[in-house]
Amino acid sequence: MNTEAFVVKSKKNPVISLGVTEGHFSTNHFHTTHYIDLDELKSNVSLARKVARELSLKYLSNTQVDTIVCMEGTEVVGAFLAEELLKVGADAEGDHTEIHVVTPVSNVNGKLMFQNNTQRLIYNRNILLLLSTISSGTTLNNALRFIAYYGGDLVGISALFNAYTEKLEHDINSLFTMEDIPDYQVFRPTECPICKRGRKLDAIIIHDGYIKVN
């Protein structure tokens, strides 16, 4: 594994950047050629505010958001995103002055769910889904299913990094895409060409980083 990370700057705002490490990585769902380090964008308050401002631009003119559903540790960005959207609502007729930011939990079977006290913030509400990374689409599609199950009306999908190419009802609004990392690839574990060449995994990607395995 090449432990020297390189930096990719956002085309929308060069102040926003992420670190990328090449290698052979595994997650719960797929193998990939790169580890995308987004933790600083999610935890650094100054950067998270800038990220939220850029993501908000798509929704300012014509999208009413009642609830932001945050996945994969994006709550800080989600809170600033709500703040940006409320700035417009406060100046408009028929003030829209409330946006809730919620995070689902997993039950004993690993399925996503909302607790009783947050279900009312989903049912019949305009939902903006916010994710950290969209690669294989597994987490995204699980999130879309449970939002629909709880009666939410999806009005947008945002992500810090998007490598998903399947067509959806809503375009994915993201800061970074595969165009920013041209060699980035994702494979099903059983179809991974790196494995077929006999190369072992370098690391397993977890929520807050990765763990080297050799």
Image: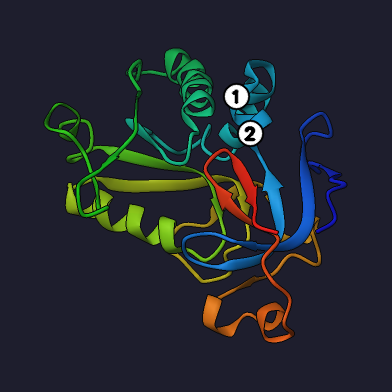
Distance of label 1 from label 2 (alpha carbons): 6 Å
Q: Looking at the image, do the residues carrying marks 1 and 2 touch, with CB atoms under 8 Å apart?
A: yes
Instruction: Look at the numbered disc 1 and give the secondary structure of its residue.
Output: helix
The image position of residue 113, as x and y in percent, is 22, 44
* Secondary structure found at label 2: helix
Q: Tell me if I can see residue 177 in this picture.
A: no
- To which residue does mark 1 refer? 43
Instruction: Please identify the quadrant where the N terminus is shown.
Output: bottom right
Which residue is at 71% across, 78% downward? 194
Q: Quadrant of residue 142?
A: bottom left
Q: Amino acid at mark 1?
A: Ser
- Quadrant placement of the C terminus: bottom right
Question: Which residue is more in the foreground, 120 or 213?
Answer: 213
In the image, farthest residue toward the left = 116
Q: Residue visible at 56% across and 45% down?
A: 159
Q: Position of residue 149 (x, y in %)?
A: 18, 53
Residue 95 versus residue 131 in the image, above or below: above
In front of the other: 143 or 172:
143
Residue 16 in the image, given as x and y percentages of width and height? 77, 32
Task: List the residue tagged with mark 2.
Answer: 39
Crowding at dot 2, Cα within 10 Å, few <14 / some 14-19 / many 20+, comes out as: some
Under mark 2, the amino acid is: Asp
Residue 104 in the image, given as x and y percentages of width and height: 30, 38
Query: On the rendered structure, is 211 left or right of 167?
Result: right
Q: Which mark is residue 99?
A: none
Q: Identify the residue at horizontal 54%, vertical 76% (top origin).
A: 189
